[in-house]
Image (tube, rainbow, N blue to C red):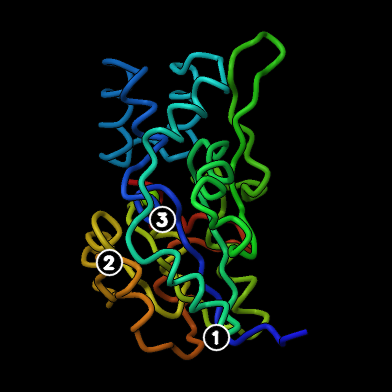
Amino acid sequence: MTAKADYTYVIDFDGTITTNDLSSELAAHYGGPIYKETEERYRRREIPIKEWLRQIVKLLPPDLELLSGKSLQWAEIRPGFNDFLDNARKMNSTVIIASDGFGFYIEPVLEKYNLLEKVDCIYRNDTRTGENGSLKVVTPHAHKTCSVCGNCKASHVVRNKEAGKPVIYIGDGSNDRFGAFWSDRICARDRLAEACKEHHLSYSSWDDFYDIINFEKPELKDCSDHSLCLPRGRGIKEEYGIK
Ligand SMILES: [Mg+2]
């Protein structure tokens, strides 16, 4: 058995592994004006992602087969991901997917492209049919008290760092900032890149996974000063709130 590795990649799914954000596309497709209003409130940081999920899931038809079918039809994998996974395996690095979307489509999408077995671990929310027949989002990886994220990506980053492995975070969304700011190298695009600029943090800009393969690997760093939350403590730091 090969020893596992020195590095851990924590990777967002929607808009990162896929070029499109499947949760947002489902929300936009079925959600109409309520989706737009909720999305704008989220973008203004008036509501956290956990509340976005809670409100938006009510707008989806309670038919997971239909929603899975749409997701599989719409999903596009970002160039280089297969080669990146092969390279990570060759280097004995660990690959973790951490997603704060509806979650149910991740394994089927990866399986469609023969990528699922190359990923070490997936932390995601789940969308299920509730007792009254409507959909609800279940968040098994949420912080016990913090109400900001459905999936506490910061906890996945910190846990790997505590095991002595530098973490490389790859993401695209503003909500990725909570996990990314704890990591030893931030690979950011789109709104995660804007969040890094907002907080004057350095990051590696990327377009596709071929870029990631070539980035230099980081050393373990203490990120407690510039992190936005305390996954081992109370969660979101008061001074950052979600505003
Ligand atoms: Mg994303």
Which of the pair 74/182 is nearer the observer?
A: 74
Q: Quadrant of the N terminus?
A: bottom right
Could you give the CA–CA distance between mark 2 and mark 3, rounded to whole angstroms? 20 Å
Q: Amino acid at mark 2?
A: Cys
Residue 196 image offset from top left, x and y in percent: 27, 66
Quadrant in the picture for residue 184: bottom left
Local SS, label 3: loop
Residue shown at 30% from the left, 75% from the top: 211
Which residue is pictured at 25% across the width and 31% down the height? 40
Tag 3 or tag 1, which sits nearer the N-term?
3
Task: Report crowding for label 2: few under 14, some 14 to 19, many 20 or more residues within 10 A (C-alpha).
Answer: some
The CB of the residue at mark 2 lies under 8 Å from ligand 1: no
Which circle marks residue 206 in the picture?
A: none
Q: Is residue 51 above or below residue 36?
A: below
Q: Are marks 1 and 3 in contact (CB under 8 Å)?
A: no
Residue that badge 1 annotates:
91
Q: Which residue is mark 2?
A: 196
> Along the line of sight, which residue is nearer the eye, 207 or 46?
207
Which label was assigned to residue 17?
A: 3
